[in-house]
Image (cartoon, helix red, strand yellow):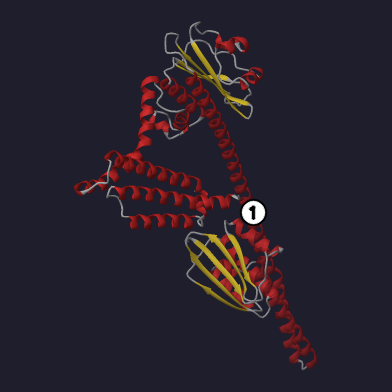
Amino acid sequence: MRPGVRARWSLVAAGVLVAAGVLLVALAGSLLGGGPALPVAAWCAGGSVLAGVVAAEVPPLRRASAAVLAGGAVVAAVGLAAALGLVTALLVLGRLPVGAERGLGTPLVVGTAVAAALARPLARRAAHAARAALHGTRRSPDELLAAVADPASDSAEGGDGEGDDEDLLRRLAESLRREHRLARVEIWSPAPGGDDVLHRTLAVPAGDEPGPRPLDKAELALLARAGVGGPGWLRLWLPRLLEGRGPDVQLRFAPAVHGGRVLALLVVERTGDADALTGADERALGEVARRLAIVLRNRALDEALTDTLADLRRANAELQASRARLVSTADAERRRIERDLHDGAQQHLVAIAVGLRLVRDTAESAGNTADVELLDELDRGVRESISALRDLAHGIYPPLLRDAGLPDALRAAAARSPLAVHVRAGDVGRHPEPVEAAVYFCCLEALQNAAKHAPGSEVEIDVDRRDGHLVVEVGDTGPGFTGAPTGAGLQNMADRLGAVGGSVRWTSTPGVGTTVTATVPVERR
């Protein structure tokens, strides 16, 4: 069965189980003259099944189908236990309740249901308390590791809140010693440098003896296959770990192994006159070591992920800075070319036009009609060249954008476009020059694309500020397109806006038109 189908059936089954629990309690209660009325119970049961069917179509609930099914099973089990309790009460009574006895039916149903629901948690707590009284074990290995691995527990236990590996191991050693009534706990782990040997990182309580030699790769290979062991194994394979320890000390060790690699080593001691270490203690120590290996591996993965994310953020910042430098350099070059055209070629053409006008006036005074017509023709050509050069300079970098702002510059660009362009601009204010330039040239690129691919269409440019963003939409009434847009111009738009932290989006519907939306985060200036 596919996982999706299994999840759906699990949710439906959970609804059926809840319905069964409700009906069992209602049927048993009805025999005692109490509990919910059968029609009400039937409605509740039907609602539970319907809720399961509806939940099967909700993806988040399907992902939690295992937990929902377990909850439904608990409700059914509680209902069955309550029903059995009520039937037992009826059997003890030996007959159906009559007269005033029927008034006790509902309290008996409620009490039996509450008792059935609380039976398991109370039994678990009672067993937990019994173990604590007899053996001093208050938490399971999972609970112990969950407590010491939580950085938030630092503050509760007097830690500094950093939650690093050294704090984790210290809290673990202290908790192990306290929970299992140990005389001493040692933890061996890699040095901060990350070498392939284990050093005795800490001992609780700390002793005055010099630190032993680290465990090398060959010794770790032995420990990786050892599991939980005691003095006998150490005398045979690793006798130096017994050096400096009393002859009557009770000692156990457990390596924390993950993927065939020993990530840490736990060594625990009890004095000879204390309670003997039992098989249950060894199993608990092995489970703690296994869980510790998972925690340490997860922390190493978290560190690697954090470093990778930091590298990605740094690379992204460098990339954005590089794009900003490229766009800034290109804009500066545009401004230089615009000034050179304005102050150089355009002024020369104006001077030529003035000279032609003087020559034309002289020829007209002399009555030379042919020369006057020729000079008029040359004058018109020079003036057209000046106009074309001015348009070219403004297209390279319009002074109006720098002097008046984005809306006026877009209106001027719309007037020069071969299409019917309408500009709607609210009170967007002024913004940094790189932002205005990026948005302006993005709009120019969109107008050029519309003129090329949607000739004769109408174009609307909408400029507005929304939620701290400058938003410009360029929409045409052309034929539109399907698929993803391509082309160097579109990539240039994305690069320009990306350099100032913005983005560009294209939406198009065949037969309706295309809309280009540029969005840049800005502050009011």
Q: Quadrant of residue 501?
A: bottom right
Residues 503 and 44: in front is 44
Residue under label 1 = 323
Residue 188 in the image: above or below residue 328: above
Secondary structure under tag 1 reads: helix
Residue in view at x 44 percent, y 47 percent: 72
Work out whether residue 18 or residue 152 is closer to the camera in this orientation and state it: 18
In the figure, 482 relative to 26: above or below? below
Residue 175 image offset from top left, x and y in percent: 43, 24
Front-most of residues 430 and 521: 521
Q: Quadrant of residue 392?
A: bottom right
Q: Nearer the viewer, residue 397 or 82?
A: 82
Q: Residues within 10 Å of mark 1 (few under 14, many from 20)?
A: some
Whether residue 282 is visible to the viewer of this picture, yes or no, is yes
Figure check: 118 above or below 484? above
Q: Residue at x 63, y 50 (%)?
A: 319
The residue under the point 44% across, 32% down is 161
Total labels: the figure holds 1
Left or right for 11, reference 400: left
Q: What's the amino acid at mark 1?
A: Arg
